[in-house]
Image (cartoon, grey):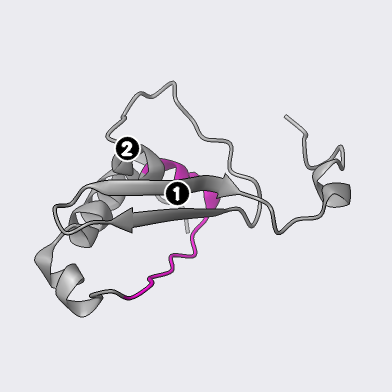
Amino acid sequence: GYEKKESSIDRSKTIINFIKSNEFKEKNNNNIVFFIIHADFMNLLLKEILNNNNPNLNFEIPNTSTSLFFLKEDNKLNVKFINNIEHLTIQNYNNPLFNKI
């Protein structure tokens, strides 16, 4: 179904707060946690993770891209990469449909 933008923004804040919570850390201590989400919501999560709520900022999120973050004990975030597409072939990446704006 459809979710209003305000509701999506609130949900992204709730998720980031949960990820930074002691409860999440206790349940996932030293584990790798995957989130598989739609691009629009990933854009909101990235903004929330990076503490940037500029409405004019949008991340271009290619299909199947991956991002890797490490959350340290002090809630400091180590960003390894955002929207990585190395797993895609150059042939697919250069496809004009892929780069359509």
Q: Earlier in the sequence, mark 2 or mark 1?
A: 2
Kindly report the distance in space between the C-alpha atoms of the residues bearing marks 2 and 1: 13 Å
Q: Is residue 42 magenta?
A: yes
Q: Is residue 7 left or right of residue 96?
A: left
Secondary element at image label 2: loop
Residue at the image point whose x is 50% and y is 45% from the top: 82
Residue tagged 2:
50
Q: Which residues are magenta?
A: 31-44
Category of crowding for the residue at label 2, using alpha-carbon neighbours closer than 10 angstroms: few (below 14), some (14–19), many (at least 20): few
Secondary element at image label 1: strand
Q: Is residue 63 left or right of residue 29?
A: right
Residue at the image point whose x is 13% and y is 53% from the top: 74
Q: Amino acid at mark 2?
A: Leu
Q: Amino acid at mark 1?
A: Lys
Determine the residue located farthest toward the left in the rendered image.
22
| Residue 44 in view of the camera | yes
| Residue 46 image position (x, y, % from top left) | 39, 43
| Residue 97 image position (x, y, % from top left) | 83, 41
